[in-house]
Amino acid sequence: MSAAISKLIISSITKVIKSTAKFDIVIDDLLEKFKEACPPKDELLLIVKQKNQIQSALTTIVDTISTLEKTASTIEKIITGVGTAVKVIKLLPLPTSVPPGVGIPVNVINGFTSALIALGKVLDSAKGAVSIVPPSAKTIGDAAKSILAKLQLLNGVIDGCAVQLIDDIAWDKDTTYQDGDIVTYGISNNEPDYYSSLLNLNLNNIPTTPTVPPSWEPSSEQAATNQIVGQIQIAASTAGAFENAGANILDEDALLARLSPNSNDPLFYRGFQLEIQFNSNNTFSFPQRRIFGTGTDALIDILNLTQTSTPSSIVITNLEGGDYSYSNSVQVLINEIKFRIDQYILSNPVIPNQDILESSIDSVYTTS
């Protein structure tokens, strides 16, 4: 490999790392802002969409690079992973309907996308220069892992804001409400009174004033909290690999059906059966969930285990602590457990059976 190509590859990788570092700074800033107060609902929903899209893109990169560290993958796998990440990151929702400075800035998104595209082109034109890529690519993977860890911290504060936002739904005479929107107006027994809109384009109708037809009906704090959590989950589910948000929601529904414990078409990934689990202690009507992976007999061949092994005793969740989340899309939950399964397999002292390892990926939902 010529020195010129080596320098070009290293330069492109360095640009990706620098662009990734900007995400790091922005997320740190978001975490600081959350410490001060929860953002207004529109801003929070934008951040949820962006967070899920970034997690999908970065998990694809980390997954690709982690596999390179121990398997005999070629440069084509890196190009594919980078291309997938570019596709996902390009779909990041931009802050068009909220004040400037909210969410992930456009220049950070565009800078990261441009750096990935440039890297993909350089790698594609230098497919023979395999030796330098895996060690250099690992640096990108480490940077991406750092951001994913911070995004998991963002999960916690977003979930907490679902409850705190209840304090920010006082009826406003200048706001046009839609059917089902919940507001507070007035106080009874030292607690706010809740009302749910019965009309679309509900403007200037005071909740306690009778109208014909009726414009408001009594509601509750629980219903208001459930509504906000539901909106957060809808925002999360619209993030995905499709340009059409509705297609992403349909994809979520299809994944949920396959993740059901009683599914006739269950999901498998590298020797693990994946199932959705819901938090039984959740107090809201909208689910708090995680992905649970149980080892199957396929692990015996993948890891060259003895026939007396009990793979079903090997269990992995999408987050190391087994936490649940309101604000992660199903695809992000799956990407997280894919990464954890890859790390488990690659940390095994026995070199995985590469052919079986590659063939044990469910092509319906994998993005790498």
Image (tube, grey):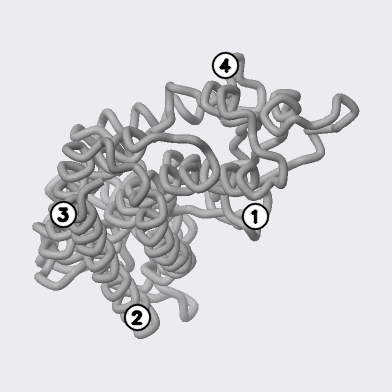
Position of 153 with respect to 240 (left or right) is right
Mark 1 vs mark 2, CA separation in Å: 27 Å
Q: Which callout, 3 or 2, points at the residue further toward the start of the chain?
A: 3
Dot 4 falls on a residue whose secondary structure is loop
Residue at image point 19% right, 35% down: 243
Q: How many callouts does the rendering have? A: 4
Q: Which residue is mark 2?
A: 37
Mark 4 vs mark 1, CA separation in Å: 25 Å
Mark 4 vs mark 3, CA separation in Å: 50 Å
Q: Nearer the viewer, mark 3 or mark 2?
A: 3
Dot 2 falls on a residue whose secondary structure is loop
Q: Which callout, 4 or 1, points at the residue further toward the start of the chain?
A: 4
Q: What kind of residue is marked 1?
A: Gly
Q: Which mark is residue 265?
A: 4
In front: 253, or 170?
253
Q: Which callout, 1 or 2, points at the residue further toward the start of the chain?
A: 2
Q: Which callout, 1 or 3, points at the residue further toward the start of the chain?
A: 3
Q: Around disc 1, counting alpha carbons within 10 Å, would you say few (fewer than 14), some (14 to 19), or many (20 or more)?
A: few
Where residue 66 appears, as percent x and y from the top left, is 48, 48
Q: What kind of residue is marked 2?
A: Ala
For the C terminus, the image quarter is top left
Residue at image point 11% right, 64% down: 107
Q: Which residue is mark 3?
A: 4
Residue at image point 75% right, 24% down: 297
